[in-house]
Amino acid sequence: MQIVVFDDHKQANFYPLTLNRSIGDLRCGILKLRQRLETAFGSDDSSSVIIDPILVPLYKERHPDWLINQPTDKEKLYLNSRIKLSKEAIKEINTMPNDSALINDEIILAAKLKSKNMSFQDDTNTISLPPQTNAITSHIGTYECLSDIIHDNGRMLKWDFENYFDTQDNFFETEPGVTVLHPYNVWIAEGVILNPGVILDASEGPIVIDEGVKVMHNAVLCGPLYIGKNSLVKIGAKIYGNTSIGPVCKIGGEIEGSIFQAYSNKQHDGFLGHAYIGEWVNLGADTNNSDLKNTYKNVAYYSYAHDSKCDSGTQFLGCVIGDHSKTGINCSINTGTVIGIGCNIWGHDLFSDFIPDFSWGETKQLVPYKFQAFCETASTVKQRRKLLFSIVEQELYQHINSGR
């Protein structure tokens, strides 16, 4: 059976992170949403996805072996990339009859089709079922915004550890001077370096440290926590639970309940809490965010989909920062602030509410970031990791910069 993971019309709810990636490629826990769905339902084939047409050239460049917005003749299990996975959800999807679909409040969650294909409307990013599909009411939950993903991260860290990492080869070897609490909750990959003074505290949840990670002296890591491949944790870092650090990141200071997609740096002192950080982000020294209002009321955040602020439904929400954005030293970021793609901001005034994509300057003097200058910086940054800022990427960012 071919697993097809699809993005629906809610993609804008996850901007700015999904301006340049599929919802299914958002990290939550150890894995990305798409990876977890494919693994849970036993896909052995190359990935098959339905995504926003504007993303197709980039995905075809990066994943030439994937089926992207292409029908297949195989029996198919369509899965909404926003599904909140649980044992109950897996059982409900696995027991679906052929030519049926699970529906929750008019949202298609999953469909099992033998020969027909679902249709995708390019102009509205909506998915439609073929005629005579049996619609079954379901109560499987879905992620509705990035705040939902941030607050489900701890659960999914535990889920991924129990389902995918606990049975893999564990290279649990530590140097003298490394303290490990609840070692059966710790999984260490090959090539990990833990320097003396490091504390791994897995008493509240698992800790997974992936290949090639280096943790420097006196860093304290509390579970549930994932540190991605080839990342660096700096001296004296304090990383609290419910945090996921993607591959090739540099991490320091104090972090709690946050997600780093990949290739981003927060090397210096400063607090980051209940935040979602994209790729190629750099946070300057002593950049801090607030994740709790002094009134203890729910945090509101700017929604691209509604072009207004929305209630996050939670007291704890720090910031969301899109890909290729940078902050200068001593930047202060207010509770629930959304910073778009390709921003370069600095100054001592508090950044609040919403910083539009490709903004440049201080909070009271923001101007558009010159696109050519943005491309030059992005190219330089990627070259430092021996990667190219391709023409296809530039064209996608140009499209975003022009107002989508």
Image (tube, rainbow, N blue to C red):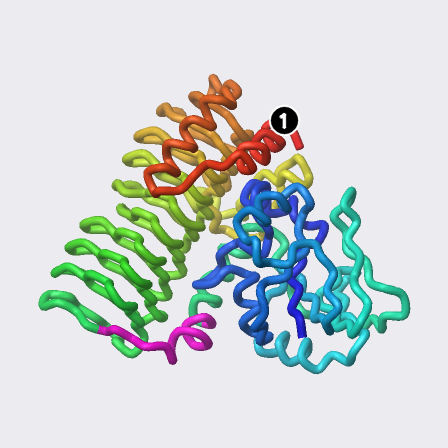
Question: Of residues 324 and 346, which is closer to you in this image?
Answer: 324
For label 1, the crowd category at 10 Å Cα-Cα, with few meaning under 14, some 14 to 19 and many 20 or more, is: few
Position of the C terminus by quadrant: top right
**Corner quadrant of residue 117:** bottom right
Residue that protrudes farthest toward the front in the picture = 64
Residue at the left extreme? Answer: 176
Q: Is residue 191 left or right of residue 204?
A: left
Question: Residue 140: x and y, percent?
Answer: 67, 69
Q: Is residue 81 above or below residue 329?
A: below
Q: Which residues are magenta?
A: 159-172
Q: Nearer the viewer, residue 344 or 333?
A: 344
Residue at point 53%, 67% (across, down): 36
Residue toward you, 311 or 88: 88
As for residue 22 lying within the magenta part, the answer is no
Q: Residue at x 41, y 55 (%)?
A: 257
Q: Is residue 196 left or right of residue 343?
A: left
Residue 132 position in % (x across, y down) = 90, 70
Q: Position of residue 129 (x, y in %)?
A: 82, 62
Q: In the figure, is residue 17 to the left or right of 164?
A: right
| Disc 1 residue type (three-letter) | Ser
| 85 w.r.t. 253: above or below | below
Figure quadrant of the N terminus: bottom right
State the image quarter where residue 18 is shown: top right
Q: Residue at x 58, y 72 (%)?
A: 43
